[in-house]
Amino acid sequence: MTKKYKSNPKEHRGFFSTADEIVDPSIKSQPIAHTQPQKPIHPVQHKPLDKSNPKHSGYKKEIKSPSPKPSKPPTYKKANFAFIDGQNLNKSIQNQGWSLDYKAFRKYLEEKYNVKKAYMFIGMVNTNQQLYSALQDFGYHLVFKPTIANKVGDIKGNVDAEMVLYALTQINQYDQAVIVSGDGDFYTLVQYLKSQRKMKKLLVPNEKAYSTLYDTLDIDTSFVDDLRNSLEYKKK
């Protein structure tokens, strides 16, 4: 006797059976006749994804990385220049009873005031070639002026015009200027450099070499004579 079980549709060749399954293997299952034609299966139509909606399934929002801001080119600060009235400096120091160590003075200008180029304006005397070579070795840029002897035999070389010319023609080459002189002839130059924010320091050899014209200008002033302990030349 065969047993019948409740209908349990199983997949056959892509369709489901509407009859009961027979357990008895002697009974062959018969193909099922369909009285009505099957409707064609149409493919499912999907709506296009709404990319504006980041919550839409299967859509990954495109995240744009912020464009880097253009970097500014690095700015380099210009070095300071020194303009030295050589005769005024040398004579004024010697009148105080000591000699200046020009090598130590050049180092002082660089370390204290960031002076990368030091112009020394000096009268040309043929017998001082050894001195000129030493000054150049110390790092000074020498600018020579022809000299003349006065009635008492003193040799003088007026370097005022050259010193003013160099300071003004190279004003765009340096950040600020250090003027080494107490001569009042440079008052107009110092006044102009101050108005252009180009005046760093006025270095006067000593108080006796200082012109009172500079009292009318609010400028930073120091005296080389105050540095005698560190800048005096001592024979070895």
Image (cartoon, grey):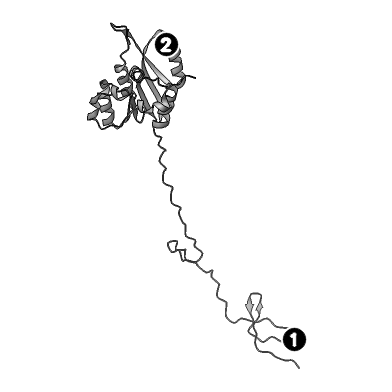
Judge from the rendering whether residue 11 lies leftward or rightward of residue 92; answer left or right. right
Q: 130 or 1: which is nearer to us? A: 130
Q: Residue at x 35, y 25 (%)?
A: 225
Mark identifier at residue 128: 2
Tell me the number on the disc at residue 167: none
Q: Residue furthest front?
A: 97
Assign a secondary structure to mark 2.
Answer: helix
Relative to 137, does residue 221 appear above or below in the rendering? Answer: below
| Amino acid on which disc 2 is placed | Asn
- Which residue has dot 1 on it? 27
Q: Is residue 217 left or right of residue 235?
A: left
For the residue marked with disc 1, what is the amino acid? Ile
Image height of 174 relative to 95, above or below? below
Label 1 CA crowd tier, 10 Å (few <14, some 14–19, many 20+): few
Q: Position of residue 100 (x, y in %)?
A: 40, 21
Which residue lies most toward the bottom here?
Answer: 1
Looking at the image, residue 200 sits to the left or right of residue 55; the answer is left
Q: Position of residue 119 (x, y in %)?
A: 38, 21
- State the CA–CA distance, disc 2 to disc 1: 136 Å
Q: Earlier in the sequence, mark 2 or mark 1?
A: 1
Residue drawn at x 35%, y 23% as measured from the top left: 83
**Callout 1: helix, strand or loop?**
loop
